[in-house]
Image (cartoon, coloured by chain):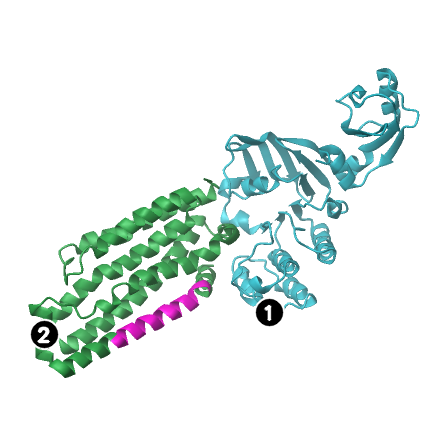
Chain colours: A cyan, B green
Amino acid sequence: METIIECKNLTHYYGARCIYTNLNFSIPKGKILGLLGKNGTGKTTLINILMGFLKPHSGKCTIFNEPSHNLSAQTKQRIGLLLEGHLQYSFMNIEQLERFYAAFYPSWRREPFYELMSKLKIAPGQRVNRMSCGQRSQVALGLILAQNADLLILDDFSMGLDPGYRRLFIDYLNQYVKAEGKTMLLTSHIIQDLENLIDDCIVLDYGKILTQLPTTELLNNFKRYRFNTPQSIEALPNEAFFNSEKNKGNIETYSFFTHEEVKYIFSKSGIQSESLMVEKLSLEDAFIGLTGKY
Amino acid sequence: MYKALLYKEFLKTRKTILALALVSIATHIYMYAKIGRSMRLVGIDHLWEVIIGRNIFLFGAITFIPLVAGIAIGLSQFVPELRNKSLRLSLHLPVKESVAVATFVGYGTIVNVALSALSLVSLTIFASIYFPWEITQRVVQTTYPWFAAGLCAYAITAWICLEPTWTRRAVNGLIGAGLVNLMFITSDPGAYSQAIGLVALIAILPYAFIAESTVRFKQGVQD
């Protein structure tokens, strides 16, 4: 399958602070990849590197087989980009934006743009700087849909949006990307929004990738375990469990191991766990399980 | 595509251009009216004598207009691109980045040159109607560094705005202030008539630095 985005051994620092070392991932054609991580783990940094707005310390990123810091005009034509905060030219109105962007994209489709604008009752003469955050997000979305790009890169698309606008945004994206075989890389702070949207996810921690899996695999295999024990939390083997917490004798922990495997590990480690309970997780719970609450 | 890029620049600058044109027209009318009044009161012969004998320059009211125009056009073009680093939108357009920035700067330069040219043509026509060729020539020679300062100030404003770090912006500002100041060292009429080439060189010098700041912006250089 054709690879659309590829990052090899990407390393970046802000001053002395390491953002990642040797980050590797790729996105095949037609896949939707969610980049998840707490604040400051480098999601926006990665998007800036991919779009050539930041020079990485070392490593290489390619988009459509071109180096990301030096994309040709033809390749940029194939990439729809949503910058953090639904950034658009604030001095332009709807009509001016549509006219402006249409000149750059040969397969520009004005109908979906105006359809979305009329649905949201945004007047053609309304200027971006007089719009609400939700309206701005839909303008940015409408422009991306009209551009008819092969690759969509969306940085924190849910930022500042109420549930209605978020749902609308996701519905449109889902329909568009899945119907037309587009590839998408996106980040969001609201993990629950991504659960039914993304095919694969990368969970970033400070300086590294915690996990990179198809979303269904993560949701099927990563479980929360709860049990009551008088023993200390330190008795749990670190390599098998994530972000274990003990509260009044109850331990809550997360693991990729199955119920049977966990029972076996406990019996081998001499952990008393008669009350062991396993729970299936939502994407947000899985994210918390991997990255921790704090 | 280029038409669209120019359209975007026009949308940002149209109000500033209109305001500058109105201020410039009003200043010229005021200046001509004042000179006309002096002609009626003291007579044109006496005015000639004052200009030649006492080395007085009658068109000083426009001294800083090109400078203000250069800065204002630069700010109106590039400040909207600085908000939330909106320049990233422009650099993501499917046009070679250097070509996009050259188009933006080219637009601003043409607007500045057009405003200066209108002013210069108006001064030349007015002066040639009432004064001998030598005085008209002196008017052009005296105002030339002011127009050059306007162009220089525009390029410096673009250079400062496109620079991503505040430290370098401050340094660029100081260099820019120094360069612009060279055009106003003396207000003596025709003082720069022997340095026309040098003035032109100073005016275009900051243009050479704009590309470097754009590259630094693109690389995400920070303080």
Which amino acid is tagged 2?
Answer: Trp
Please identify the residue farthest to the right as the structure is shown.
Answer: A274
Which amino acid is tagged 1?
Answer: Pro
Is B17 in front, or is A108? B17
Q: Is residue A106 magenta?
A: no
**CB under 8 Å between discs 2 and 1:** no
Residue B22: image x %, image y %?
A: 35, 73
Compared across the picture, whether A60 is left or right of A285 comes to left
Is B220 in front, or is B1? B220
Figure quadrant of residue B110: bottom left
Figure quadrant of residue A244: top right
The residue at which mark 2 appears reads as B48
Q: Nearer the viewer, mark 2 or mark 1?
A: 2
Q: Chain of mark 2?
A: B
Is A30 in front, or is B133? B133
Residue at (65% x, 51% y) in the render: A159
Quarter of the image that includes the C terminus of chain B: top left
Residue A151: image x %, image y %?
A: 62, 47
Compared across the picture, whether A279 is left or right of A83 comes to right
Residue interval drawn in magenta? B12-30
Q: Main secondary structure of the magenta part?
A: helix
Please identify the residue farthest to the bottom as the structure is shown.
Answer: B40
Determine the secondary structure under disc 1: loop
Determine the secondary structure under disc 2: helix
Is B127 in front, or is B7? B127
Residue A49: image x %, image y %?
A: 54, 40
Residue A25 visible, this angle: yes
Q: Dot 2, how many residues are within 10 Å of its Cα: few (below 14), some (14-19), or many (20+)?
A: some
Compared across the picture, whether B118 is left or right of A230 comes to left
Residue A279: image x %, image y %?
A: 86, 35
Q: Is residue B25 magenta?
A: yes
The residue at which mark 1 appears reads as A124
